[in-house]
Amino acid sequence: LNSGPHYFCPDPACDIVYFGVDGSSFRQEDVRATVWQKSSGLNRTICHCFGENEADIRREIARTGRCGAVARVRAHIAAGRCACDLRNPRGACCLGELTETVRRIGVEHTASSAAPTTR
């Protein structure tokens, strides 16, 4: 991204990941990491520093009823191991998105567990 300042576009409906003031843009196929906000499916990586992804979060919640991903990432951050400014395509900490994803998947799991089964 040498041609001047670039900004991240989090809109999942937009295929541009980064856009520059000079009119340049980069799409998902132009960047190395899969961009969580631009991806669909169950295996989206949310935390690029520590590999937390939706599939693992879903498995952990299904197996134990809870998920420790947020606590694990917080421990890494406290230990000074975070590099979100370099690894996260958004260039910022993933903790807010990770927290919201764990919450959302937990709610989905609770709702599906409480739903009556039909035969």
Image (cartoon, rainbow, N blue to C red):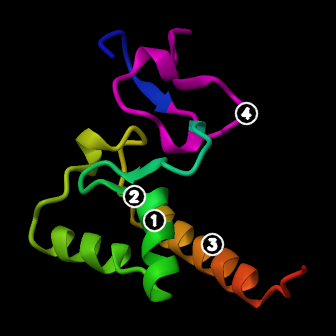
Residue at 36 percent across and 9 percent down: it is 3
Give the amino acid type for the residue marked by disc 4 in the picture: Ala
Q: Which residue is mark 4?
A: 13
List the residue tagged with mark 2: 94
Q: Give the spatial CA distance, label 1 vs label 2.
A: 6 Å
Q: CA distance from mark 4 to mark 3?
A: 20 Å
How far apart are the two marked residues, 3 and 2, measured between alpha carbons?
15 Å
Q: CA distance from mark 1 to mark 3?
A: 10 Å
Dot 4 lies on which element?
loop
> Can you give x and y, in whole percent of width and height, for residue 57 in the image?
45, 68
Quickly name the residue at label 3: 104
Q: Secondary structure at mark 1?
A: helix
Front one among 61 and 34: 61
Indicate the amino acid at tag 1. Answer: Leu
View extreme (front): residue = 119
- In the rendered view, tell whether residue 18 sits above or below residue 77: above
**Which tag, 4 or 3, sits closer to the chain's start?**
4
Give the amino acid type for the residue marked by disc 2 in the picture: Cys
Q: Which residues are magenta?
A: 8-37
> Is tag 4's residue or tag 1's residue first in the polypeptide sequence?
4
Question: Label 3's element?
Answer: helix
Q: Earlier in the sequence, mark 4 or mark 2?
A: 4
Residue 73 place in picture, x, y as percent? 27, 69
The residue singled out by tag 1 in the image is: 98
Residue 12 on the magenta span: yes
- Corner quadrant of residue 60: bottom left
